Amino acid sequence: MSAITRFLPKNHLSYFIGKLVHIRLPSFINKFIIANFAKAYHIRLEDAEFPYDQYPSLGEFFIRHLKPGIRPVASAWAVHPADSVITQAAVITGGKLIQAKNKTYSLDQFTKDPNAMAKWDQGTFLTYYLCPTDYHRVHSPVTGTIKKVRHIPGALWPVNAWSTENIHEMFSINERVLVEIETDRGPVGVMFVGATNVGHIILAFDETIIGNQLLSSAILEKEYSLPVKKGDELGAFRMGSTVVMLYPKGALDGVPVANYLNQQVQVSGALS
């Protein structure tokens, strides 16, 4: 598997798969594909905003909204940003985040923010892995003001056990989009991390930022002053990937984040 993964044109493959799953096929074919995809991944069709046969493509079904009110927003200061499994959760120590056992990656390289150490070192990070079963929209974990977005083009390695254990600084290599939210406890970072077959990352509040367009390797940074509430939608993955949360020192004092390791969580559930 490693040899194949290393030599695949991962970005181009992901780009075209992203296009392919959004092709609008005849309704009876589309219905068959979505029904079997949902069955294969044990997706709860009753949670979707619309009946599955009303989605015009597999891609649109994949980024479906949920029925209103099905994920009530918890009263805790911070909530989970996505339906996912938490694969890592710890204090950021010496500017290092845990990628896998005995393997770390750099906060500076990951964020490409010259002020990252001042913002998040000695704070807390949590890694949320979204599989095909999960709802693939990402929501704000906190109430505050969106101040900045940084789009960092990169590779699209699969975010699986083999890659996290073998690819050095994989999370700093893959394409990613960092949404920075100013809160009453300091800056909170919501990092969307792309992966193989993520057609692209999209943001709910800025349609001009789109991941994996094969056009540029330049980092794009934009500033905002947009109020956001816990539970508001921030964006989505057009196929599965990972969110890494960055919290400043003290923001999650008293929260036993290590207890969440390997737990399945739901968007807007309490982080407490």
Image (cartoon, rainbow, N blue to C red):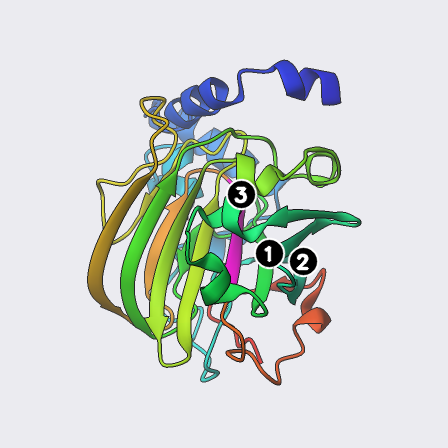
Mark 3, residue position: 241
Q: Which mark, residue 22? A: none
Q: Is residue 90 visible?
A: yes
Residue type at numbered disc 3: Ser
Whether residue 125 sits left or right of residue 135 in the image: it is right
The residue at 46%/70% (across/down) is 268
Position in image of residue 182 (x %, y %): 33, 70
The residue at 55%/75% (across/down) is 271
Instruction: Identify which residue, 148 or 59, lies in the foreground.
Output: 148
Closer to the chain start, of discs 1 and 2, is 2
Instruction: Identify which residue, 107 or 154, lies in the foreground.
Output: 107
Please say if the residues under marks 1 and 2 sit with CB atoms less than 8 Å apart: yes
The residue at 71%/64% (across/down) is 261
Quadrant location of the C terminus? bottom right
Magenta residue check for 242: yes
Please say if the residues under marks 3 and 1 sit with CB atoms less than 8 Å apart: no
Q: Farthest right residue?
A: 102
Whether residue 220 sits left or right of residue 13 in the image: it is left
Mark 1, residue position: 127
Q: Nearer the viewer, mark 3 or mark 2?
A: 2
Give the vertical position of 25 relative to 89 (above or below). Answer: above
Numbered range of the magenta stretch: 240-246
Q: Residues within 10 Å of mark 2 (few under 14, many from 20)?
A: many
Mark 2, residue position: 88
Position in image of residue 197 (x %, y %): 51, 29
